[in-house]
Image: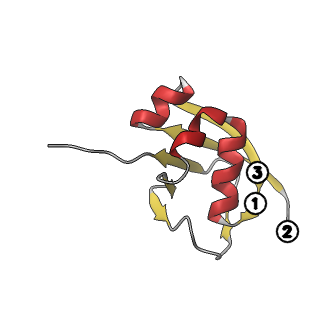
Amino acid sequence: MGELVKITVLFFAKSRELVGNKSSELEVKSDVRPTDLLQSIISKHNSLQILSGSLLLSINEDYVDINSEEIVSLKSGDTVAVIPPISGG
């Protein structure tokens, strides 16, 4: 437990605009709570702080409950998507 893995973080919509890139590489612990994973992403990309209360995450295309205390297991090569609130009409 606690092994570091390299993941790819994808940014969509407003998060992409704030970060200025569509993706980023990040090293995180392999076993992590979703809230800690989000905090690691925000720590690397401070511009996301203004959206921190409304971001969604998905891991390998499966949505994750940010408020869950359940540990998620990540492997090198996994993809985490950062999804901001999206409005439409």
Q: Mark 3 points at which residue?
A: 28
Q: Where is residue 77 in the image (x, y as percent from the top left)?
A: 65, 47
Q: What residue type is labelled 1?
A: Ser
Q: Do the residues labelled 1 and 3 touch (CB within 8 Å)?
A: yes
Element on which disc 3 rests: strand
Q: Residue sitting at 49 percent across and 51 percent down?
A: 55
- Whether residue 10 sits left or right of residue 85 in the image: it is right
Q: Position of residue 61 (x, y in %)?
A: 45, 55
Q: Distance between the residues labelled 2 and 3?
A: 12 Å
Q: Residue sitting at 43 percent across and 45 percent down?
A: 84
Q: Which mark is residue 64?
A: none
Q: What residue type is labelled 2?
A: Met
Q: Which of marks 2 and 1 is nearer the N terminus?
A: 2
Q: Looking at the image, which is closer to me, 69 or 4?
A: 69
Q: Which mark is residue 30?
A: 1
Q: Residue sitting at 54 percent across and 40 percent down?
A: 50
